[in-house]
Amino acid sequence: MLKAAFALIPLMAGYVFISTWLATRYLIKREDSQKLYIRAAFWGLWLFLLAFALTFQIKDSILVGLGFFRSLMEIVPFEAKNEKIDTAFWIFALTITLLTGTFGGYILNWCYAIATLILRTIVGKKPALSDIYNYARRESIKKAINVMNADLELILLRAMEENMPVCVTLGHGKVYVGFITGSIDPGDKRDMLRILPLVSGYRKSDDYKITFTTSYIYLYELCIEGKELGHLDPSKFEIVFPHCEIKSVNLFDINAYNASQADSTEFKNLPSK
């Protein structure tokens, strides 16, 4: 049983670790099972070596703890019953491995957030620790998107960072322009895009130029001003699209659009930001 524990526990610890550590959390979500297994085994081995080194250094001061594991061996039929001290040592090391894998990712995430907070405080910025943690999460998502070459998520993330609307063209020709309101996760199995629309329309079948037919901006003004739509808020108009129905996505700038439409009077009330 101890031999099986040597194989299983580091693997479990490695998987939990890479699932919680921001540097690997988003990378593994699109990997196949074999590559995921190898990555979990790789980090599990390093966690086990770390636990072994720690246990070896403190073995003389954990006699009480080893006593607990010796009593455990009386219940569970481990091998090497005549070497209880050594067996207890390895069980303790495996326990440390599992604990390190369970909490190590979170600890590294907060260490990165605190280090970033200290650096920003030194340069004169004093954001909240929660904001720094969210910043660390966004940076990890951005790195994962670039490593995986996830083109759609890269455009969406750029739109969120630059506070720009996107133009979404669906497979049946419907077009929406709006701000992204949902989270961007390259490993999200739901594969959905949520936006707050500004205008909508369709692409003509002959030349594929966009014709806008509906503006939502006036509706939002009615919501905010508490008039006819005062019982609603703009978030009630959010729209969700499955990725499989999206034909194209691009950043949308009203000034660039108006420049390309010389005589167009569309979007005259649409703010550029």
Image (cartoon, rainbow, N blue to C red):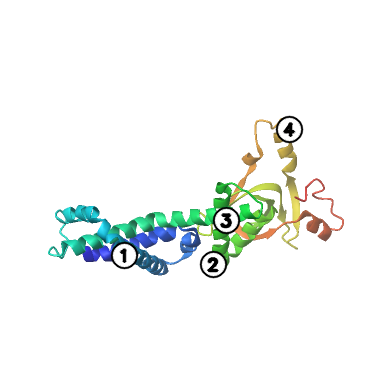
Crowd rating for badge 2 (residues with CA inside 10 Å; few <14, some 14–19, many 20+):
some
Residue that carries the numbered disc 3 in the rendered image: 116
Name which residue lies at 71% across and 35% down.
224
Q: Amino acid at mark 3?
A: Thr
* Residue at image coords 57%, 51%: 132
Which badge, 3 or 4, is on the more N-terminal residue? 3
Q: Tell me the element at label 2.
A: helix
Could one spot residue 171 in this view of the protein? no
The Cα–Cα distance between marks 2 and 3, rounded to whole angstroms, is: 25 Å
Q: Nearer the viewer, mark 2 or mark 3?
A: 3
Label 1 – label 3 distance at C-alpha: 31 Å
Mark 3: few/some/many CA within 10 Å (<14, 14-19, 20+): some
Q: Is residue 41 left or right of residue 77?
A: right
> Of label 1 and label 3, which has the lower sequence position?
1
Determine the secondary structure under disc 1: helix
Give the amino acid type for the residue marked by disc 4 in the picture. Glu
Query: Which amino acid type corresponds to the residue marked 2 in the rendered image?
Result: Met
Q: Position of residue 196 (x, y in %)?
A: 65, 46
Where is mark 1, residue-wise? 52
> Which residue ends up furthest to the left in the rendered image?
82
Report the residue marked by disc 4: 225
**Which residue is the site of mark 2?**
148
Mark 1 and mark 2: Cα distance apart in space:
34 Å
- The residue nearer to you, when weighing 85 against 12, is 85
Q: What separation in Å lies between label 2 and label 4 (alpha carbons)?
A: 44 Å
